[in-house]
Image (cartoon, rainbow, N blue to C red):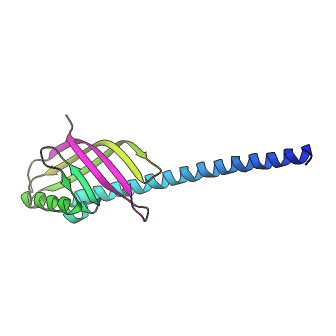
Amino acid sequence: MNARKITVVALVWALSLVGMYWWASRRDTMTLQQDLVEIEKLRQREIAATLSQDPAALADLWTDDVVRIGPGQPAEVGKQAVLDSNARQREAAPGLKALTYVPAAKEVIVTSDGWAFEWGTFTATFVLAPGAEVQTMKAHRMLIYRKQPEGTWKAARGMTAPAG
């Protein structure tokens, strides 16, 4: 093989590698953007479920093997435990009405293997009964999301702590 043919083969090989690298990084960027869009959709469902105070809609935000940890209570393990806890909270405060719920992610990290990590805060306003004084709650939160087979995301682990 002469030098010219070797140069052409080497150039084609190098351009192929550059093209593969470019396509892989573009695909990764597109996948990351889509994952962030899907996580935002989950966050919007979380806001709607929180404002409705629907125990089933709130539980549906979580994976079946969820672990949810809140201040001053035992960890809730499994979706049924979360659903039961949501229902007990609703029964204990039947007049509770959520007025606002604003989660604010400070950081979201999405991995290439179907996990995402988020930490931030949320602020909520609510009344305990019709005509009662409006109360405000602020808290820190950490969530670990898992990508579902169809491409949506659910929370797999969650923890809240009062902001103070």
Q: Quadrant of residue 95?
A: bottom left
Apparent side of residue 119 relative to residue 3 in the rendered image (left or right):
left
Apparent side of residue 132 relative to residue 27 in the rendered image (left or right):
left
Number of numbered callouts drawn: 0
Reply yes or no: does residue 125 show up in magenta.
no
Residue 91 location, x and y as percent? Answer: 8, 61
Residue beneath the point at 26% across and 49% down:
158
Residue 54 location, x and y as percent? Answer: 20, 63
Apparent side of residue 146 relative to residue 57 in the rendered image (left or right):
right
Secondary structure mainly formed by the magenta segment: strand
Residue 3 location, x and y as percent? Answer: 90, 43
Reply yes or no: does residue 144 show up in magenta.
yes
Q: Which residues are magenta?
A: 135-161
Of all residues, the one furthest to the right in this rendering is 2
Front position in the image: 58 or 154: 154
Of all residues, the one furthest to the top in this rendering is 164
Residue beneath the point at 23% across and 57% down:
51
Of all residues, the one furthest to the front in this rendering is 1
Front position in the image: 45 or 109: 109
Residue 159 location, x and y as percent? Answer: 24, 46
Residue beneath the point at 64% across and 48% down:
21
Front position in the image: 62 or 136: 62
Vertical order, 60 against 127 (above or below): below
Image quarter of the C terminus: top left
Residue beneath the point at 85% across and 48% down:
8
Vertical order, 8 against 62 (above or below): above
